[in-house]
Image: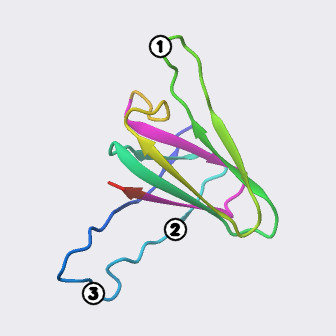
Amino acid sequence: MAQTPLSLSAAYILTPAGVTAGQLDKAFAASDSVNGNSFVSSGKDMLIAYNTDMGAQTFGIQSAPDQFGRFANITYSMAAGAFAAVIITSASIYTQPSGLVLLTSSSANVKFLVIQGA
């Protein structure tokens, strides 16, 4: 199955010039609970997951095998209305050899936002 790619948002570095209206706005994307989602790792990414459902939902991050072939997949349960934030670096075992980070979710009510360079 091919994962649904997520759009990426760049982190904004504040300057003395300030910001204009809308410049810091970011949009969450509905997760694909059938095919999964993926994004290309920049080396330092922040994944924010948001459970918009009335009940608990889960999301997962698929690990790549370490030098011994072991996996450490993560499945995280979020309460209704909860947010979760994870920083994924290039050195983590959650970046696949292809450079992709692979995500799963229990429902399309889980929304993802990926901020690169965080």
Q: How many residues crowd mark 3 within 10 Å: few (<14), some (14–19), many (20+)?
A: few
Dot 3: element: loop
Please tell me which residue is depicted at 82% across the width and 64% down the height of the picture.
Answer: 55
Is disc 1 placed on a helix, strand or loop? loop
Decide which of tag 2 and tag 3 comes sooner along the chain: 3
Say whether residue 36 is visible: yes
Query: Between marks 2 and 3, how big is the CA–CA gap?
Result: 21 Å
Q: Relative to 48, is 26 above or below?
A: below
In the rendered view of the protein, which quadrant contains the N terminus? top right
| Position of residue 59 measured from the top left corner of the image (x, y, whole percent) | 66, 49
Q: Residue furthest top?
A: 68
Range of the magenta residues?
98-114
Q: Which residue occupies the extreme left position in the image?
A: 17
Measure how far apart labels 3 and 1 are at the Cα level: 47 Å
| Disc 3: which residue | 20
Q: Residue furthest bottom?
A: 21
> To which residue does mark 2 refer?
28
- Whether the magenta-drawn stretch holds residue 95 is answered as no
Q: Which residue is mark 1?
A: 67
